[in-house]
Image: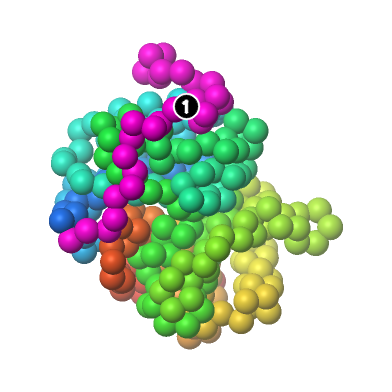
Amino acid sequence: MAADMNQDENLGEHDDSHVDQSVNVSDDIRNVLTIDIGGTGVKASVIDMNGTMIADKVRIATPHPCPPGVLVELIANLVSPLPHYDRVAIGFPGAVRSNIILTAPHLGEEIWHGVDLAALVCQRLGGIPTKIVNDAEMQGLAVIQGKGLEFILTLGTGCGTGIFLDGQLAPHLELSTHPIGKKYTYDTYVGNDALVKIGKKRWNKRVQKMIQILEALTHYDHLFIGGGNSRNVTGELPANITCVSNDAGIDGGAALWSSHPIRHPEHTLAENPAG
């Protein structure tokens, strides 16, 4: 399906001067196409500006290798059956600044660095204004309370993080690639490969150690734990730590385009599984 599109890494250097991305947040926005790109799967749905899904999620496995052209064409095919949308919001598994990809540890660093994925998707979907942030930050937008320093930690293929101060997204810190110990990064320490290799009990001890490090590093007021493996976090957690559903990765798209906070308490997991 991607044969008709340039799939090489130079796709990120295209001339997008005819695509108007200079659109302000507006009350006229009704529906947002939200795309959650992960290391193992790409999910999408259309939500209204309250963050409520108006279409069932669609999902497809993330291809590997996954150069920009392949991913953009995959997205276009994936979302083609979905209903009308006015804006696009994308969560990407890596560091993003001003819609530009800086790192892509699970998709290929060299082919993704410097790619304006928002412009590529905007162009491919017919000029629909598009924003992109780190995928953990997208989840955080759906669950934060907007008070104090809030931290989102996502546990999935790897490890993602996002920081918010009084509801505003702070500059991204790519902690997933930061060393922990002598032979690990946060990604390899608590990512899915580690969970499979060492088992849930030892993996949870690693998660607890990482929480201690994050608390000492940021002195967060509240920590949210999301991602597909948040359901595997066991044991009692302090009152200022909340496990949330992975569905928040979709619902956060409305908040990215909203001029006011959108909260989703329904993503809170009622209780952690018994250890």
Task: Indicate left or right for 130 with 148 as reference.
Answer: left
Relative to 192, say whether 243 is above or below.
Answer: below
Question: Outermost residue toward the front?
Answer: 17
Instruction: Verify whether residue 121 appears in magenta.
Output: no
Task: Indicate left or right for 238 with 59 as reference.
Answer: right
Q: Residue at x 15, y 56 (%)?
A: 28
Quarter of the figure with residue 265: bottom left
In percent of width and height, residue 70 lies at 45, 25
**Quadrant of image for the N terminus:** top left
Q: Is residue 139 visible?
A: yes
In percent of width and height, residue 84 lies at 16, 41
In percent of width and height, residue 158 lies at 58, 51
Instruction: Verify whether residue 5 appears in magenta.
Output: yes
Which residue range is magenta in the image?
1-27
**Quadrant of image for the C terminus:** bottom right
The front one of 80 and 103 is 103
Q: Is residue 232 visible?
A: no
**Numbered label tally:** 1
Relative to 41, say whether 152 is above or below.
Answer: below
The front one of 135 and 96 is 96
For disc 1, the marked residue is 14
The front one of 121 and 59 is 121
Q: Residue at x 22, y 58 (%)?
A: 26
The front one of 59 and 162 is 162
Quarter of the figure with residue 78: top left
Mark 1: amino acid: His
